[in-house]
């Protein structure tokens, strides 16, 4: 399977995850200004994400009741599912639903775990990519609200760009490398609060078993 075919399958898995989320609007990042114009004064949180990000199917319910009137961003813990499974939290605080080890955020905003309010989105084009968004928030003195609920995960697989240089050239070593990743995630304990990741995770592991010619 080619890199591009694998990425396409990963995007389909992410799209399936998004399709399970009710009461949300999906849009391309370039259409955010027109979306904001169309919604007028409506209260909203906007999450940027890419093709290896998953969201809790009850996202809208988890967000209900959060007061966004005087803040710029709502920030949540998030799961990073890779050969090392990590839950990132604000200052490394424990959280219900943690999977793997717990570490503090490496950036103010990390991939798909920050929801932006209308007030913040005056700078919408500087907030798409999380490292730039973190710098922008610092420069503009954004006000963040930390919420202890896991609403998202990022799936960093052997087909992620940062992994490509690590892939073995030898076919047998390659298969072992891939299956090590599969086995780590298969044996990871998932608490009840995070069982919403089980469906996309199973699809992902089946994909990488097929890359190695292994049955699902």
Image (cartoon, helix red, strand yellow):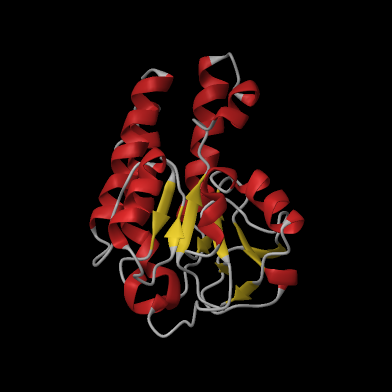
Where residue 29 sits: x, y (%)? 41, 42
Residue at 31% in and 33% down = 9
**Total of numbered circles in the picture?**
0
Q: Is residue 44 left or right of residue 154?
A: left
Where residue 194 sits: x, y (%)? 44, 70
Closer to the camera in the image, 195 or 68 = 68
Closer to the camera in the image, 124 or 160 = 124
Residue 216 in sight: no
Q: Is residue 6 left or right of residue 90?
A: left
Name the image quarter holding the C terminus.
top left
Name the image quarter holding the N terminus.
top left
Q: Is residue 73 above or below residue 93?
A: above
Closer to the camera in the image, 179 or 25 = 25
Q: Is residue 16 above or below residue 30?
A: below
Residue at 72% in and 50% down = 135
Residue at 75% in and 70% down = 91
């Amino acid at each position: 399977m080619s890199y591009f075919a694998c990425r396409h399958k990963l995007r389909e898995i992410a799209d399936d995850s998004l399709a399970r989320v009710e009461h949300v609007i999906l849009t391309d990042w370039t259409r955010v200004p027109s979306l904001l114009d169309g919604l007028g004064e409506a209260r909203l949180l906007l999450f940027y994400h890419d093709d290896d990000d998953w969201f809790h199917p009850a996202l809208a319910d988890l967000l209900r009741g959060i007061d966004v009137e005087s803040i710029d961003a709502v920030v949540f813990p998030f799961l990073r599912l890779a050969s090392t499974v990590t839950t990132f939290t604000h200052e490394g605080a424990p959280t219900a639903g943690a999977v793997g080890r717990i570490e503090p955020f490496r950036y103010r905003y990390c991939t798909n775990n920050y929801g932006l309010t209308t007030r913040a989105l005056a700078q919408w084009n500087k907030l798409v990519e999380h490292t730039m968004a973190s710098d922008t928030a610092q420069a503009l003195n954004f006000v963040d609200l930390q919420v202890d609920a896991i609403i998202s995960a990022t799936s960093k697989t052997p087909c992620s760009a940062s992994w490509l240089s690590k892939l073995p050239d030898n076919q047998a070593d390659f298969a072992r490398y891939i299956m090590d990743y599969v086995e780590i995630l298969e044996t990871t304990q998932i608490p009840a609060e995070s069982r919403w990741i089980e469906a996309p995770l199973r699809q992902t592991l089946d994909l990488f078993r097929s890359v190695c010619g292994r049955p699902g």
